[in-house]
Amino acid sequence: MRRRAASRRFTTVFFLGLVLVLLVMYMSLATGIIQLTHFEIIRTLFGLNENLDDQLVIYEFRIPRITIAAFVGCALGIVGAVLQGLTKNQLADPGILGIQAAVGFSVVCYMFIVQSNVVGMSGQSIFSMSLFGWLGGVLAAIFLFMFSRNHGELDPKRLILVGIAINAEFGALTLFVSLKMNPQDFEMATVWLSGSIYSASWEQIYSIIPWLLIVVPFLIWNSRTLNLLQLDEVSMVGLGLRANRVRLLFLLGAVGLISSSVIVSGSISFVGLIAPHISRRLVGIHYQYVMPISGVVGVLLVVIGDWIGRTIFSPAELPVGIVISIIGVPYFVYLLMRSTRSM
């Protein structure tokens, strides 16, 4: 009976979340420096508007940007839930574990080597940069597993500490490489690292879609296993669960999603931290419910953050990563104080 009620609650929250996502996307599509009426937007979407300026604004600027924001938010929200489940720590997120920093370092190295930036790149260049970033994420994951083991088992507490060290190390290396760039590339790298999707393009959308289609269904399909990972090691062995193998598969999937996201948006912090907490308040603690809702909440956070960054401060533009950080820092302090009281 309780399980059925939880399932109904999840279904209700999920579909209400999707409706809210569509409303926020339309709001973002309709507003900006160039104002479009509802009639113009609908005619353009259905191919009835022959105004080339309206088509350019919607199809080349706003739709790619909103789509990238939605994809990145979904990926970061789901990854945040996965990492908090793996580490048994509700303060874990891709930034704290150093994976975002490692991917960012790899991409900055790519930009430095090929003397290029993320604006106007061809599909092949974006694919190459995506592969470069994924290798950086895998390297960080290898370090995490190497130095987080205790008596052959992955220690969640040590994983957090090692992740903080990796984050600091790759952050310093990224700054060092950035300072070696020419001024134009350095400026672009700085804006990109702060978390920005203003250069969104259809090529970037195509580069992230395969990761979402492959990794997200895998993680959600196996989300019930994360519930078992919350048990102690003895109980997991008694249930026949190969915990280290499962953790490795989840971590590699998370690295793939983080890498594909960082490539197109830079390092957007706090989404992976906040989204799972909001989801647990809405649907409970079971990961088969938390993970999809985290994806929906992540979409809302990034799309709304991008809309605020490009409209509230118009004609200037604030990167979405900075907007979410302004929101996320107070929430992080609140979570930290709350966890300290419960100890």
Image (spheres, rainbow, N blue to C red):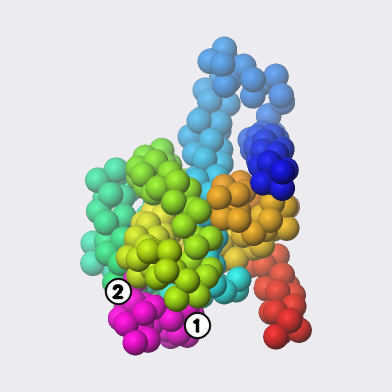
Residue sitting at the far top = 48
Disc 1 and disc 2: Cα gap in Å? 17 Å
Which labelled disc corresponds to residue 157?
A: 1
Nearer-the-camera pick, 237 or 273: 237
Q: Which residues are magenta?
A: 141-168
Residue 335 in percent (x, y) is at 70, 74
Give me the residue at 50% from left, 53% from top. Answer: 224
Residue type marked 2: Ile
Mark 2, residues whose alpha carbon is within 10 Å: few (<14), some, or many (≥20)? some
Task: Name the element at disc 1.
Answer: helix
Residue 315 in percent (x, y) is at 66, 51
Q: Is residue 166 magenta?
A: yes
| Visible residue check, residue 209 | no
Which of the 4 quarters of the picture holds residue 42?
Answer: top right
Give me the residue at 45% from left, 75% from top. Answer: 233
| Visible residue check, residue 74 | yes
Whichever of callouts 1 and 2 sits on the residue coming sooner in the sequence is: 2
Magenta portion: prevailing SS class: helix
Which labelled disc corresponds to residue 255?
A: none
Left or right, residue 40 beside residue 261: right
Q: Is residue 9 above or below residue 76?
A: above
Residue 56 in percent (x, y) is at 51, 30
Nearer-the-camera pick, 4 or 28: 4
Give me the residue at 70% from left, 79% from top. Answer: 339
Task: Name the element at disc 2.
Answer: helix
Mark 1, residues whose alpha carbon is within 10 Å: few (<14), some, or many (≥20)? few
Q: Quadrant of the N terminus?
A: top right
The mark tally for this picture is 2
Task: Name the residue that disc number 2 marks.
Answer: 142
